[in-house]
Amino acid sequence: MLPYSRQSIDEADIAAVVAVLRSDWLTTGPAVDRFEEGFARFTGSSHAVAVSSGTAALLAALHGMGIAPGDEVIVPAMTFVATANAVTWCGAKPVFADCDPRTLLIDPDHAATLVSRRTRAIVAVDYAGQPCDGDQLRSFADAHGLAFLADACHSVGGSWRGRPVGQMADATCFSFHPVKPLTTGEGGMVTTNDAGLARRLKRFRNHGIDTSFRERAEQGVHHYDMVGPGMNLRLSDLQAALGLSQLARLDEWTRQRNRLACMYDQLLEPLDWISPLAVHRDAGHARHLYVVRIGESPGGRNRNGFFRGLRERGIGANVHYRPVHLHSWYRQQFATGPGMCPVAERAGETVLSLPLFPAMTEREVALVVDHLCELACQPAGEPAGMSRREFASTGPGGGRANPPGRQSA
Ligand SMILES: *Cc1c(COP(=O)(O)O)cnc(C)c1O
């Protein structure tokens, strides 16, 4: 099975983790400091605070910004549920903004219609790895007196107008899950230029306590004070060592992802029933996902038909995302539903993420496109591996097939 994404682990990564296993500190140790310093340098931000996941990063950042019950936070509908879930865990209400049909990034014009007296922040998601227009969102947030949070879980390694992702928002959140561009197994990071926020984040990830275990050990004291709410959102040194080792190869991986994406663009160009997302000329795309939209294929096959067909052929395509406001819990809790974000809803039915990861070969890209072309010309209900004639002789209801749909043009 060719997966839609896969981590790259080399011997240097393994050696870095093993070195931590042989050391005194498995958590709250010096590897976490080194990863944070390296990550802050990489993103050009003043502070980086490592946490246990991208979700933890979002939760800590929102809490650190003071988001609390009674507040509203604007989030894009076209994102992973974690973005909105973090808002609800702060007791606040997520208000869903629609997206630009060309890029599927948050639509600031729609967001502007959602600002109320209670709105405290806007979260922008760098969907598929394309950085949002940080300058525009900065002005938007300033004009409305909002905090600006970037969910950059897709876009580590990307840039906007030459500036690395991680320095434009009040806080930027990253995920290091294995499908993301850089991995620590599980893990996350918040970058910020606000020293006070960085201090609050470090406290929040460690039970709201003012010093870490290592600081107390080094100072030879046992006393600590819990000065605010918190929980355990720490990243271990094993994970931090892996992250720092991975960071050294991230630029090379981003270039390779862009090369492969460019090849997809060229091969898909002649096919009018499939369209890649637009890329802004000022965006340095991190290419976490290669997302296409499926239109009317000659054989009448829709997005779900391509998803199934590719799976049957060993190609692990995926769907990012079913818009958050359509999930049951959001409908129940916040009375959301169809019609609120029509562009995201339409995209939720037509998007497909094709395999893309640094170790993928150009031959594999070409293979994926060949399979897409073959599937496009097959009638939608026809099972893979069966010629049209064999299918016809099986007749409607035979095998796993639905009655044949429209014939290919
Ligand atoms: C992956 C992801 C998250 C959550 O990150 P985890 O590390 O899995 O907790 C949040 N937002 C977006 C957009 C993501 O893709």
Image (cartoon, rainbow, N blue to C red):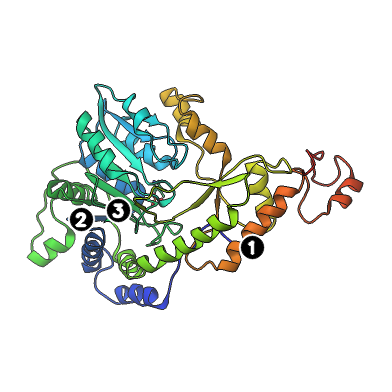
Task: Kindly identify which residue carries mark 2.
Answer: 45
Residue 86: image quadrant is top left
Residue flagged by tag 2: what amino acid is it? Ser
For mark 2, give the secondary structure.
loop
For mark 1, give the secondary structure.
helix
Q: Residue at x 70, y 48 (%)?
A: 376
Quarter of the figure with the C terminus: top right
Q: Residue at x 39, y 56 (%)?
A: 286
Gap in Å between the C-alphas at discs 1 and 3? 32 Å
Q: Earlier in the sequence, mark 1 or mark 3?
A: 3
Estimate how packed mark 3 is, as few (under 14), some (14 to 19) or many (20 or more) residues with alpha carbons within 10 Å. many
Provide residue 28's location: percent of width, then percent of height: 23, 62
Q: Earlier in the sequence, mark 2 or mark 3?
A: 2
Residue 284: image quadrant is bottom left
Task: Kindly identify which residue carries mark 3.
Answer: 165
Question: Can residue 327 be seen from the camera position used here?
Answer: no
Estimate how packed mark 2 is, as few (under 14), some (14 to 19) or many (20 or more) residues with alpha carbons within 10 Å. many
Residue flagged by tag 3: what amino acid is it? Val
Q: Is residue 325 above or below residue 117?
A: below
Estimate how packed mark 1 is, as few (under 14), some (14 to 19) or many (20 or more) residues with alpha carbons within 10 Å. few
Quarter of the figure with the N terminus: bottom right
Provide residue 341's location: percent of width, then percent of height: 46, 29
Q: Residue at x 44, y 59 (%)?
A: 178
Task: Kindly identify which residue carries mark 1.
Answer: 367
Provide residue 277's location: percent of width, then percent of height: 49, 46
Q: Earlier in the sequence, mark 2 or mark 1?
A: 2
Residue 251: image quadrant is bottom left
Q: How many marks?
A: 3
